[in-house]
Image (cartoon, rainbow, N blue to C red):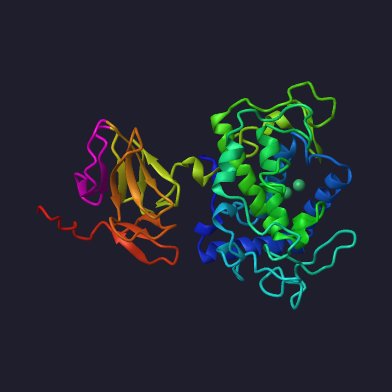
Amino acid sequence: MAPRVRRNQEFLTKAEKQNYVTALLEVKAAGGYDQYTRLHIQAADNRLVHGFPSFLPWHRVFVSQLERDLRAGRPELTVPYWDWTRADDPKTSVWDEAFMGPGGSPVTKGAFAWEPTHKWRCIGPDIDPALERNLGTDPRDPRTLPTAADVAYCNGWNIYDRYPWDRTTTSAFRAAIEGWIPLDRLPAMHNRVHRWVGGNMADFGSAPNDPVFFLHHANIDRLWAEWQDKHPDAYQPTGEDPRDGENIDDPLALFTNPEVVIRSVLDTKATDLDYVYDTQRPSAQGSVMYPGDVVRRGASLWDPTHKFELVLQGTDGNLVLYDYTVTPRKAIWTAWTVSPETAVCIMRFDGTLAVLDRNETVLRSYPQQSPVRGSRADVTSTGTLEIKDLDGRIVWNSKQPAPVTANA
Ligand code: CU1
Ligand code: CU1
């Protein structure tokens, strides 16, 4: 089985978002959610994890364990991530009333408002039951979120961490992405996002009271996973640190049943974790290519009834849709990407389905005009390749006549 895929919340349908919210409410009602908030309070009170090398692996496990609980009744679900570099705006999709809900002190709308449903009660010492968020409006908080340039700054560090392995460390990836190196006046990156959201998210220990905590940490984990793709075997320290829970072969703090050794969670594709992010070019499964998904040369997708195959042919690099209801099989659509250089078909985040060569040059892309960001490609059981937006509207399909070119 291919690893499951964590996706950008921006590209989930309303139904998928609703499913995630319902799963959270169920785990909350069963008492499972609050154990994570309590564990996080314990980590903060004991000055563990935050400000140290284990910050990234510890939160990786933390998010994965909640994901496991959410998946118990809904195996198709993964924790989405919130890419805040695109979202300085409090009206962005993550704060939709039907998803994480809007800002407010307290929040008064959506599934996580305390009134009137009393389903989402915040817990912890001196914590009001009603969820609060300021979303960049409190003058004491940062008014802006980290940018793509800030992410690039973090990615510029080739060393994972370095002495003294704490929040005074500078010049290392972990310290930069956690946010102890101020890019300007304020703690940047991870810490900055907590403070921009404000309210419960700004309370160090009990921040997981706000369910957006997990979407934020999935994004931090994604950025680390992408960095790890370029810097395998980079984790440090490997034996120099006297503090328990930080060296590569130490068990992480507070995860006792079972213990989790840092080395065992450095690869998200390892069987205990078994996930990747949509930005890591996951292979499409089933009949749909979600944003980010790829079909590599020699691989194919089948419609749900297994009568139609979309294949990026290993033999000649052509992208072809075949009909198997007739014998011999018949090619019913092709992108004409015949080339020894053809490498991959990708559903890009901008809403185009593209065939790329080995240098990432676009050989063909669909639709040629007006793509809709976040669209999906679907091999249907009627033998059509369709590109659909998040509301299910068809943006392009393989039965459309080829556009007439000026030279035709
Ligand atoms: Cu934390
Ligand atoms: Cu955090």
Coordinates of residue 151 in the picture (x, y in percent): 58, 43
The stretch in magenta equals 315-340
Which residue is nearer to you in this view: 255 or 43?
A: 43
Residue at coordinates 33% horizontally, 40% vertically from top-left? 356
Q: Position of residue 350 (x, y in %)?
A: 41, 54
Quadrant in the picture for residue 176: top right
Give the answer, above or below, for where 203 lies relative to 268. Answer: below
Residue 149 to residue 228: above or below: below
**Magenta stretch: dominant secondary structure:** loop
Residue 72 visible? The answer is no
Q: x and y percent of residue 115 in the render?
A: 76, 76
Q: Is residue 317 magenta?
A: yes
Q: Residue furthest bottom?
A: 116
Residue 16 in magenta? no
**How many marks do you count on the picture?**
0
Name the outermost residue toward the left. 408
Q: Nearer the viewer, residue 9 or 53?
A: 53
Q: Residue furthest top?
A: 239
Tell whether 305 sits left or right of 336: right
Residue at the image point whose x is 23% and y is 59% from the top: 399
On screen, residue 259 above or below 144: above
Instruction: Return the residue nearer the eye: 135 or 219.
Output: 135
- Residue placed most toward the observer, 171 or 86: 171
Residue 272 visible, this angle: yes
Quadrant of the snapshot with the C terminus: bottom left
Q: Position of residue 200 (x, y in %)?
A: 77, 60
Res 315 quadrant in image = top left
